[in-house]
Image (tube, grey):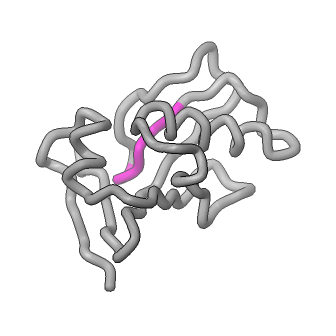
Amino acid sequence: MKPLQIQEGREGVYFYVQLIPRAGKDTIVGLYDRALKVRLKAPPVEGKANAALVKFLARCLDVARSDVRIVGGHTSRRKRIFVAGLAGAELRRRLGLGEASAVKRQA
């Protein structure tokens, strides 16, 4: 399995999420195509799944909701996420992924 691809920027980190809406419960189920695979109960209508994803990731990463932003893929299941104030190693630690995830530095 390929590791989660993480890009570090000056202000925080970027990574991808593969979202599965209308699931039985909110959970991280692993990795899929170098993205974090997340299942959410929220339906993919009127931005409900996006809002639920931001709230869920903020809770999992122990950061404020305002620190988590969807920066790409608003209408897609594959979303690019930005988390302010975290480094790649800290993101991996908080997600319980260990050191196997690939980290790319972004200027």
Judge left or right: residue 82 versus residue 92. right
Judge left or right: residue 61 versus residue 74. left
Judge left or right: residue 23 versus residue 1. right
Quick one: quadrant of the C terminus? bottom left
In magenta, the rendered stretch is: 33-38
Q: What residue appears at the point 45 percent right and 42 percent down from the top-left corner?
A: 63
Residue 56: which quarter of the image? top right
Where is 36 relative to 107, above or below?
above
The residue lying furthest to the left in this view is 99
Residue 24 place in picture, x, y as percent: 63, 14
Residue 37 is one of the magenta-drawn residues:
yes
Residue 22 place in picture, x, y as percent: 71, 25
Q: What residue appears at the point 53 percent right and 60 percent down from the top-left corner?
A: 80
Q: What residue appears at the point 38 percent right and 65 percent down from the top-left corner?
A: 12
Residue 105: which quarter of the image? bottom left
The residue lying furthest to the right in this view is 46
Relative to the observer, which residue lies in front, 40 or 68?
68
The residue lying furthest to the bottom in this view is 107
Where is 40 relative to 76, above or below?
above
Residue 38 place in picture, x, y as percent: 50, 34
